[in-house]
Image (cartoon, coloured by chain):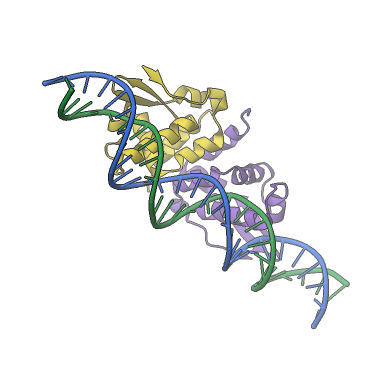
Chain colours: A yellow, B purple, C green, D blue
Amino acid sequence: MRLLPHPAKEDIQLTEVLRALADPVRLEIVVRLATLGEMTCTAAGDHLGVHKSTASHHYRSLREAGVIVSKQEGRLKYISLRRGDLDERFPGLLDSVLSASHAPA
Amino acid sequence: MRLLPHPAKEDIQLTEVLRALADPVRLEIVVRLATLGEMTCTAAGDHLGVHKSTASHHYRSLREAGVIVSKQEGRLKYISLRRGDLDERFPGLLDSVLSASHAPA
DNA sequence: ATTACAGTTGGATAGTTGTCAAACAATCAG
DNA sequence: CTGATTGTTTGACAACTATCCAACTGTAAT
């Protein structure tokens, strides 16, 4: 199991989190992770309609912003939301964004 | 008194709001408006450290995203947060962002 | 070893963004 | 009318972004 560089909880910046969430593709990834929990990159990028390398770039944006964490296991890489860290750093933010993402179009 | 084009409440899009808030300069404008209430563009852009035309572009971004509303009165233009609309459309979102903006660096 | 699978990286490209500066428009005061 | 104030618009420019494709890395299965 290998870990990639992630920002420490206290180093997560609000504007970077917001910027990461401000892209429709990335927001969909986040909603999916929030709903279904940890999953592989392939599963997360399944229905996004973008090339797998594009999805990979989005994972990196989300990871560097501190929104998701990824861990390698064998040839699979599992990604998941940093719910606890985000809730401690910015209470209520993730929940309100997730809730807002279900608002009628 | 003149009104500029703003999106209707139900047309405010989450990703556009997040993108508008994801810029440090714009976030500071929003925090200032939340703290001090309605103010002129000059007052809002006073301490931002950017050219007035740059600030004007940010006002436009915020307005088109549905975050602020502006109304012209004489030669002054007052801008203010669309708190009510945002709270109805995305409950809790603005509050959590404002609260998060006061988190320790 | 060869093959297949999972995911990243680098290049290319087209579009967007943040910024300043200069010119402009609109309003108000003398 | 003239001049000052308020704010927008346009142009230029550098930086960033989202995307695809192709090549690559690392792991596991045959």
Give the percent coordinates (x, y) of residue C11.
Answer: 39, 45
The reply, left or right, for residue B100 in relation to residue C12 is right
Q: Nearer the viewer, residue A30 or A53?
A: A53
Q: Quadrant of residue A83?
A: top left
Q: Name the residue located 44 percent from the left edge and 49 percent from the top edge.
A: B13
Whether residue B97 is visible here, answered yes or no, is yes
Q: Nearer the viewer, residue C24 or B63?
A: C24
- Against A21, is A72 above or below? above
Q: Name the residue located 47 percent from the left edge and 25 percent from the top edge.
A: A5
The reply, left or right, for residue D14 in relation to residue B15 is right
Q: Quadrant of residue C3?
A: top left
Give the percent coordinates (x, y) of residue A99.
Answer: 42, 36
Q: Nearer the viewer, residue B24 or A104?
A: B24
Q: Name the residue located 37 percent from the left edge and 48 percent from the top edge.
A: A105
Whether residue A38 is visible here, answered yes or no, is no
Q: Name the residue located 70 percent from the left edge and 48 percent from the top edge.
A: B49
- State how many labels appear: 0
Q: Nearer the viewer, residue C9 or B72?
A: C9
- Against A55, is A71 above or below? above
Q: Quadrant of residue A63?
A: top left
Residue sitting at the far top: A1
- Against A10, is B19 above or below? below
The reply, left or right, for residue A75 in relation to residue B5 is left
- Quadrant of the rendering where the N terminus of chain A is positioned: top left
